[in-house]
Image: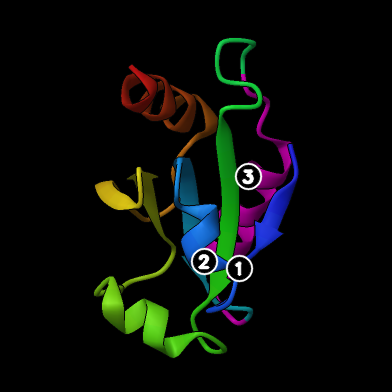
Amino acid sequence: MTVEHLDATTFEDAIAGLALVDFWATWCGPCKMQGAILDKLELPADLAGKVRVGKVDIDREQPLAVRFQVQTIPTLILFKGGQPVERLVGVTRADVLVEKLRQAAL
């Protein structure tokens, strides 16, 4: 799975379908743990090719963090059709992420 680094110019396109976006910062220890989970995330065949996974550095992209009211990091937001459908705050295990993605794909 390739995790895309998103910014203001790439964000809207990335969330147009089904997307999981990690709002994080370089100085955040739990964010590094979440990043490692995302980097190793293996999607099952029924989700492969249907989900985009991205990261937004809140220090570089503050307007996006403000827009989605990110107050604690890491925060993962699941988007479907450009709209947020679920928010996960704190480090979230891979199996939980896959299940949330599977539910959103229905």
Residue at 33% in and 27% down: 104
Residue at 39% in and 23% down: 105
> Do tag 1 and tag 2 residues touch (Cβ < 8 Å)?
yes
Q: Secondary structure at mark 1?
A: loop
Q: List the residue tagged with mark 1.
A: 6
Location of residue 78 with respect to 71 vertically, above or below? above
Place of residue 23 in the rendered image (x, y in percent of width and height, measured from the top left): 47, 67
Q: Which labelled disc corresponds to residue 38? A: 3
Circle 2 packing at 10 Å, graded few (<14), some (14-19), many (20+), is: some
Residue 103 visible, this orientation: yes
Front tag of 3 and 2:
2
Residue at 53% in and 79% down: 8
Q: List the residue tagged with mark 2.
A: 11
Q: Mark 1 or mark 2: name the one nearer the start of the chain.
A: 1
Place of residue 69 in the rendered image (x, y in percent of width and height, measured from the top left): 24, 75
Q: How is the image coloured?
A: rainbow
Label 1 – label 2 distance at C-alpha: 6 Å
